[in-house]
Structure formats: structure tokens, C-alpha cells
Image (spheres, helix red, strand yellow):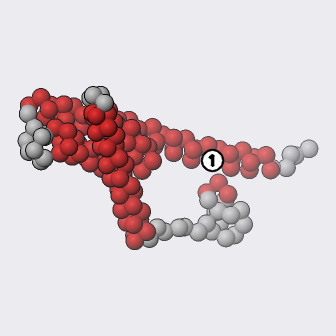
Amino acid sequence: MLSPLEGGQGDDTPAQATVAEPAGVLSGAVSQISVTAFVVILSAGIARLFEFFDVRTAYLVFLPVITGACAIGGVFLGMCAAGLSALALWCLFLSPDGFTAPGRADLAHLCVFVIVACFGCWVIDGLRRTREELSRDNAFLGRKIALLLRRKKIP
């Protein structure tokens, strides 16, 4: 018998475990990556629009996409967004002839961008995990307090 603190229902019925289906997880990951790719393409369009107005902020436009993807989908989705953003920067903004090797300065800027994006993903993922742990701890303490408050007082 599991107690309410251990995940049981409070009576003799054990808690039922839910098992995620691999097909559902895979389709969810594919849809998240495709939405991330769409937002990266949208950001590339915004960066091109900024270039039209002589504002050179191609790198900065992609950072909110990376941080948002990491905050919503975790570190894997954040790294996918960082990789897609680096690829978009390389193909659309650094190389005038498409997918050719950029110059040393552009390559250094791209490397710094990728390092900053990875660091941001690491920080956001750490904050996300800490929030989840605190949420679990608060739920456990809430159940424990509710159990203690339900006890009868001995006269």
C-alpha cells in the first residue's frame, strides 16, 4: 500500500504509472524542431528587413529564438535552434556566394555567437531544472502538510 506521500491514492489502490509512447514522443520532437526551424527562418527574414534599413543586427535577432526554444523545449531544442541559427547566419549573412567559407573575422564572430548561444542554453536549462525540482519539492511538502493537518488531535 502506498501512502499519499508516496504517490498512492490514499486507499489500497496503487498509483498508476503512465508510460509515454515512443511514436508520440518522436512526433512531438519533430513538430517542435519544425516550429523552431520556422521561427529561425522568420528571424532571418527580420534580419534581412533590418539590413534593408541599414541596421546590422543579424546575430542579435536569433538570440531570442534560441533562448525561447531552450526555455520551452529544453536544452536539445535550444541547441537545435542554435545550430539552425548558425547555419542561417553562415549561408545568408556571412557568405556572399551561398555556402562558402567565410573570412577569419566572420568565422570568429560566428564562433563567439555559437559559444554565447550554448552558454545561454546551459544557464536556461539549469534554471528550468531548478524550477522543476522546486515545484516537485513544493508539491511534496504541500501533501505532507495536508496529511499532518488531517490528523486528529489527541485531547
**Number of numbered callouts drawn:** 1
Residue 8 position (above or below residue 147): below
Q: Residue at x 28, y 39 (%)?
A: 48
Q: Secondary structure at mark 1?
A: helix
Q: Decide if residue 125 is in sight here.
A: no
Task: Give the percent coordinates (x, y) of residue 44.
Answer: 30, 43
Residue 104 position (above or below residue 37): above
Task: Give the percent coordinates (x, y) of residue 117.
Answer: 30, 37
Q: Residue at x 37, y 66 (%)?
A: 26
Residue 33 appears left or right of 115? right
Q: Residues within 10 Å of mark 1 (few under 14, many from 20)?
A: few
Residue 98 appears left or right of 150? left
Q: Residue at x 32, y 38 (%)?
A: 49
Which residue position holds label 1?
Answer: 139
Q: Residue at x 65, y 54 (%)?
A: 5
Q: Decide if residue 89 is in sight here.
A: yes
Q: Can you name the residue that lies furthest to the front here? A: 52
Task: Give the percent coordinates (x, y) of residue 6.
Answer: 61, 57
